[in-house]
Image (cartoon, helix red, strand yellow):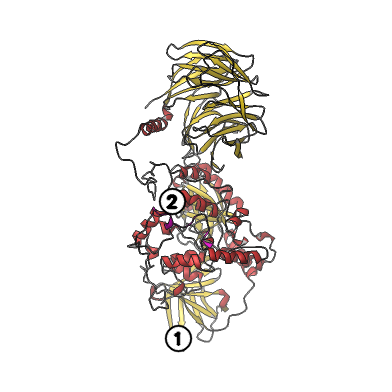
Amino acid sequence: MRFSLLLLNLEEYYFEQHTANHIQNKGGHSERKIRGSLKICSKSVIFEPDAISQPIIKIPLRDCIKIGKHEANGSNRHCTKAKSGAISLLFSQVYFIKEHNIVAPYKIERLHRASCLDKLGDQTAMITAILQSRLARTSFDKNRFQSVSEKPHMECKAEMVTPLVTNPGHVCITDTNLYFQPLNGYPKPVVQITLQDVRRIYKRRHGLMPVGLEVFCTEDDLCSDIYLKFYEPQDRDDLYFYIATYLEHHVAERTAESYTLQWQRGLLSNHQYLLHLNNLADRSCNDLSQYPVFPWIISDYCSAELDLSNPGTFRDLSRPVGALNKERLERLLSRYQEMPEPKFMYGSHYSSPGYVLFYLVRIAPEYMLCLQNGRFDNADRMFNSIAETWRNCLDGATDFKELIPEFYGDDVSFLVNSLKLDLGKRQGGQMVEDVELPPWARSPEDFLQKSRDALESTYVSEHLHEWIDLIFGYKQKGSGAVEAHNVFHPLTYEGGVDLNSIEDPDEKVAMLTQILEFGQTPKQLFVTPHPRRITPKFRSFPQTCGHTAPLADSPVSPGEESFEDLTEESKTLAWNNISKLQLHEQHKLHKEAVTGIAVSRNGSSVFTTSQDSTLKMFSKESKMLQRSVSFSKMALSSCLLLPGDATVVSSSWDNNIYFYSIAFGRRQDTLMGHDDAVSKICWHDSRLYSGSWDSTVKVWSGVPAEMTCPKRHQFDLLAELEHDVGVDALSLNAAGTMLVSGTREGTVHIWDLSVATALHRIPCHSGTVCEAAFSPDGRHVLSSGADGCLNVTDVQTGMLISSMTSDEPQRCFVWDGNSVLSGSQSGELLVWDLLAGKISERIQGHAGAVTCIWMNEQCSSIITGGEDRQMMFWKLQY
C-alpha cells in the first residue's frame, strides 16, 4: 500500500476504508474503471489505486460542492463505486499525489470556486462528535488477546499519535500486555506491547493538555514503541499507574535528577543525557511540535581541520542562538524595550515543525508536502549547507533554530538525497541535492562522527549545563530568561496561554493551531542552576553506553599508577562488593542505645558513646572492655578521636563537650559551649565544630591535637552558624572548607567556612535530618531523613539531583558518591545504588534501629551500633 497517514491534514482522523472502483467519465459513453480503496477521513476523502502508476487522489471535504448517489453532468465528476453503490462527488479541486509512485509536489486540479466553509470551531465540534459516536459504538475485540488466560484490567478510548496524524481507537491493558486497536484497522488491526518488555514510560503534554503517554521498550532508543493520547486525563493517569505498578519490581522510575547524577559522575554521555532530558520534558519524535532539541555545538564551519582542543571552535553555550550575534541582539533588545505587553524577544522559536522538517526533508518529504500544502519550500531556503544554515542562524532576522538529535546520530540519510527528490533549482542554477558539508568533514559519516566527538568533548562537558539552564532550566522563563536574553512569545510556554479561558470555539481552535505550528518550549525540569559535569582526569565512559568518548585527553599509561590511584582502586573494589558484608562478631557493651563510634588509627581500640551516659573503650585484640567512663548523668551523643589517638572528645545532652585523656585515664577538660544538648561534633585542622539543639553550629579553636598535659585549655569561639531550629546532623568535606548541617525541620544547610556563610538552605526532608555527609570528592551532599528519603544535593548549585525513598527512616550511613550503606530504623543494613536508583541489597543486622556506623579508610571494615545496645563488627567477603 502506498497510502500513508502522512497524506492527511494536521490532526485529521482516518475513520474507515472500502474496496472501490474509481470511474472516470471521459465524455460520451466512454468510462475507465480504476480499482483501489476509498478512505473516509474527517477532512477529506482519499482514493488509493491498486496500480502504483496511478496517483492517489485526495479530495478535501471543504472543497466538495455536492456529494450524492446520482449522476452529475460535466467533466468534474468523480464516481466511486463501493459495496454501497455509486457515490458521485462534485468538487472544486482535487489533489493528485505520488503519480507513478514518485514523491513530488501535489498536482492540483481546480474546477470551480469553493463553496463557503463552515466556521473552524463548528467543524472541529462536528468531527469530535462523529468520532466519539463511532468510538462509543465499538469496543476492544478481546479475541485479539494473545492468550485466553489474560485478564483485562482497563479499557478506554484513546488515539495513537504519529507525526502530523492521530489515529483513534481503543486501549486495553491486561496482566501481561498493552493493546491498541485502531478504529480503522490501520496500520494493523492491533498494536501489542508486552509489559515485560517495557523499560520506560512518560506522561506527555499533548496540545497543551496532560493527556499523553509514551511507552519505550528499550533504554536508549530515540523513538518510542507507542504514543497514546487520551480523551480524559484520568484515563491516562490510571493506565500510567497500572504500568508503573507492574514495572515497580522490574524497572526503576527515572527523574531528571537521577539522570543528572548519572551524567555528572560519567555514567551517561552528553548525548544520552540530552535524550533523557528531552524525553522528560515532553519532547517526542512522534510530535513534530515538540520534537527533541539538541544544541549547535560547533561554530567553525570554515577550517580544513576541526580543532576540538581550541575553545574558539565551539559555540557559546551560555547564550541562546538569538543572542550569539551581538549586533542582531542589540536590534532585538531595542525592539523588545519598545514592545507593549506581552513582550518577547524572538518572533520565531528554536524548535518547530517547520524547522524539524527543514532538516529532515530528504528522508521525510511527505511530511514536508503535507505541512506545506503539497509543495516543497523555495530551493534557496532549503537545507542546502551546514555552514550556510549556521550563518543564517547567526545573522538572520527571524532564524534562531537549534539542531535535532540526528546531527549527533549514526544515520546520514538526512544529509543525502538518496531518494533522488526534485527539490528545485537554486538561483545560481545548481539543483538541490546532498547537503554541503564543512571543509573539515570528508563525508557525511565523518561529519556525524566529528559532531559526536565535539558533543562529548571536554569543553562541552564543562559548559553543557549552561545550555541546559536555557532550554530546560531556570533561564527558560522568568527573570533568568530576561537576563539571558532568552524570552520567547507566551504561546510557546506551558501555561503561557489558558485555552480554557477562550470561549469562542473558532478562536480556541485557531490559537491551538498557532501554538502547535509556532513551536513549544520544553517542560521546565530545573528551577535552580544546573550543576556542572564532574570531569575527573582518568574517567571514561563504559563501552556499553551509546555515543561515548573518554573525558581524559591523555589517559594514564600502564605502570604509571600512583599510590593514591591504587588506594582508590581498592576502595572502588570494596564498594563494588559492599553487598557481601558478613557479620564477624558482636558485643553488648552498653545499657542503652549506642550513639557514637571512634576507632584508633591502628584499629586496635574502639571507643563508643551511649545514651547510658558512658564512654567505653574496647580492645579488638583481646575482645575485652578496657575502660568505662561517665562524665554526667545525661546521654552522650557522639565521639571522635583527635589526631595522635591520645584524646577522645564526646558530646553530651547536658550542653557540654568532654575531653578524655587516654594516657591519663581521666576527663581532662570540659567545653560548656551551648545552651541545649550537643548533638554532633566534627574535627579538622585544630578546629572543633559542634552542632546543638540550641539552633547553632559553633566553630572553636584553641584545642591542641594532643592534649597530653594536665592543664586546662582556653577555647576560642571563631564562628557561630545560626539555624532556625535544632541541629541534628553535622559533617565536613575532606578539605575542611565546607560544612553541612541538618535540622529538625528537614532543612539541609551547606556552609562556606572561609566566610562562615550559608551557600544553600535546602528544605529537602519532611522530618528531622538524621544524617548528612559530603561525597569523597566534595561535589555532592547526601542526607537521610525521618521521612525515609535519601537525597543527593549538588554542592555548587544547591540543586536536589536525586531522591530515593524507603519505607522507614535511615538513621545513619556511609557512602562513596555512587553507593550507600545505610542503617535503618528496623535494624537492617541497606545497600543503595544511587546511579541505578534502587536498593540492591538488604542485610539483616540489629534487633532495633541502627544508630551509628563507622567505616575504615580502606572501606573494608565496618562497625555498627544500635538501639539493641549491640556493637557489630562486619567484614567484606571478596
Q: Which residue is mark 1?
A: 26
Q: Which one is in front, 127 or 723?
A: 723
What amino acid is labelled 2 in the image? Tyr
Q: Quadrant of residue 230?
A: bottom right
Q: Which residue is mark 2?
A: 459
| Residue at left offset 45%, top offset 61% | 187
Q: How far across and how far down the image is residue 58, in percent?
A: 49, 74
Q: Which one is in front, 275 or 189?
A: 275
- Mark 1 and mark 2 lie on one chain; the one further toward the N terminus is 1
Total of numbered circles in the picture?
2
Start-end of magenta stretch: 308-322
Q: Is residue 835 above or below residue 470?
A: above
For disc 2, the neighbor class at 10 Å (few under 14, some 14 to 19, many from 20) is: some
Left or right? Give the position of 20 relative to 701.
Answer: left
Residue 12 shown in magenta:
no
Q: How far across and how far down the image is residue 676, in percent?
A: 67, 24
Mark 1 secondary-structure assignment: loop
**Residue 209 in view of the camera:** no
| Residue at left offset 50%, top offset 85% | 75
Q: Which one is in front, 2 or 586?
A: 586
Q: Quadrant of residue 504?
A: bottom right
Per the rendering, the mark at residue 718 is none
Q: How far across and how far down the image is residue 306, in percent?
A: 37, 58
Principal SS element in the magenta part? loop
Q: How far across and how far down the image is residue 525, in percent?
A: 56, 49
Residue 312 shown in magenta:
yes
